[in-house]
């Protein structure tokens, strides 16, 4: 069979046809071919992990198995993806050096193939590409992303002119679920403060009325309507005589400015940006406005 291929870089190849076998052979094997792979990737090979010499469907299957609670903490580890040397064809079970086509049956083990990451995937609708600066394969199409050298990661080109740089922006764990962000397969959200977090973790925070960055405490969305409701609540909640002249110092989590304001049991408003996302830094009694903000959002 003639194979149509597109070279997306010097070490990545995307093929349109997935077998060097004859059309008759391919037709007979098609039902079996379509069911190969794992929950992470559709492919026609398994990998032999160089770290433990065991066979797995993909690196994620290895990492999930070797980092489970059943494994002793001392023995937990991730597979060094770039060091994978051997793969096993899922059709004929022949173990061989890492390559796109099986040396025995000729089947293409993955329409997308990267020689650096030792990565195979049949679902080329993801528009996979290898980022030399990141050192790993990413999805979404190379033309749609740019690599920021200071942040050390790839961002959508929509953010190219206006994004705020944070050194090593994704080289850390998600502050909610603690999964390492740099090579996660889940979608990532860049907050207005430039900190990064899984998009589904942001949505989970919103379900629990949490609207501030878990790293720096800045607001993650427009809270002006909530601040207006707090204005009304404070105006309708006069303080007892004992506290009417009490002043406290607050720090605004949004603009970073200190303000000397009148104490109120509900919340304290920043005199600089009018945000209620503040914390008391001097004076007693100590109060926190976070719980009141939560109630107003509901």
Image (tube, helix red, strand yellow):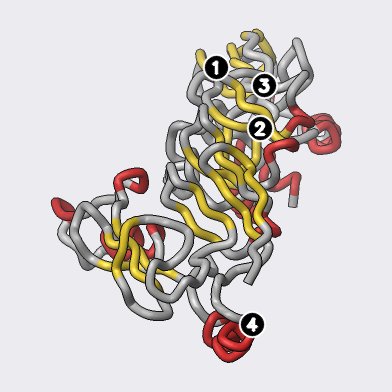
> Within the image, what quadrant is residue 48 found in?
bottom left
Determine whether 240 is above or below 165 in the image.
below
Could you say where residue 28 lies in the image, as x and y percent from the top left? 58, 91
Q: In whole angstroms, how far apart are the C-alphas of marks 1 and 3?
A: 24 Å
Could you say where residue 109 lies in the image, as x and y percent from the top left? 49, 66
Count how many numbered circles sit on residues in the image: 4
Q: Nearer the viewer, residue 233 or 28?
A: 28
Determine whether 46 is above or below 5 in the image.
below
Q: Which of 292 and 95 is in front in this view?
A: 95
Q: In whole angstroms, how far apart are the C-alphas of marks 2 and 4?
A: 41 Å
Residue pointed to by mark 4: 23
Query: Mark 1 or mark 3, which is nearer to you?
Result: 1
Marks 4/1 in contact by CB < 8 Å: the verdict is: no
Question: How dense is the environment of label 4, judged by Cα within 10 Å: few (below 14), some, or many (20 and up)?
Answer: few
Q: Is disc 4 placed on a helix, strand or loop?
A: helix
| Residue found 52% across the figure and 53% down from its top | 113
Along the polypeptide, which appears first: circle 1 or circle 2? Answer: 1
Marks 1/2 in contact by CB < 8 Å: the verdict is: no
Quarter of the figure that contains the N terminus: bottom right
Residue 254 numbered tag: 3
Could you say where residue 17 lies in the image, as x and y percent from the top left? 65, 67
Residue 155 numbered tag: 2
134 left or right of 234 in image = left
| Residue found 75% across the figure and 10% down from its top | 272
Please indicate, yes or no, whether residue 237 appears anywhere in the rendered image: yes
Along the polypeptide, which appears first: circle 1 or circle 3? Answer: 1
Along the polypeptide, which appears first: circle 3 or circle 2? Answer: 2
Residue pointed to by mark 1: 150
Determine whether 241 is above or below 60 in the image.
above
Along the polypeptide, which appears first: circle 4 or circle 3? Answer: 4
């Amino acid at each position: 069979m003639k194979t149509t291929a597109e070279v997306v870089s010097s070490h990545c190849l995307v093929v349109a046809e997935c077998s060097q076998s004859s059309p008759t052979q391919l037709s007979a094997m098609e039902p079996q071919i379509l069911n190969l792979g794992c929950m992470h990737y559709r492919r026609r090979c398994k990998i032999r992990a160089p770290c433990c010499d065991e066979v797995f469907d993909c690196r994620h299957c290895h990492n999930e198995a070797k980092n489970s609670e059943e494994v002793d903490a001392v023995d937990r580890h991730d597979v060094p993806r770039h060091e994978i040397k051997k793969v096993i064809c899922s059709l004929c079970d022949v173990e061989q050096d890492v390559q796109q086509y099986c040396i025995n049956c000729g089947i293409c083990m993955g329409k997308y193939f990267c020689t650096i990451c030792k990565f195979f995937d049949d679902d080329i609708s993801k528009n996979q590409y290898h980022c030399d600066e990141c050192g790993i394969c990413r999805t979404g199409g190379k033309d749609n992303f740019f690599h920021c050298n200071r942040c050390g990661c790839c961002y959508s080109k929509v953010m190219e002119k206006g994004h705020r740089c944070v050194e090593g922006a994704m080289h850390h764990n998600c502050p909610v679920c603690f999964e390492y962000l740099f090579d996660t397969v889940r979608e990532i959200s860049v907050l207005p403060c430039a900190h990064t977090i899984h998009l589904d973790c942001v949505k989970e925070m919103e379900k629990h009325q949490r609207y501030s960055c878990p790293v720096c405490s800045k607001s993650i969305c427009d809270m002006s309507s909530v601040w207006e409701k707090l204005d009304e609540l404070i105006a309708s909640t006069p303080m007892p005589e004992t506290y009417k002249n009490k002043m406290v110092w607050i720090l605004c989590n949004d603009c970073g400015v200190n303000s000397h304001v009148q104490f109120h049991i509900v919340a304290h408003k920043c005199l600089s940006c009018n945000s209620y996302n503040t914390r008391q830094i001097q004076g007693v009694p100590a109060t926190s406005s976070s719980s009141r903000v939560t109630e107003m959002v509901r």
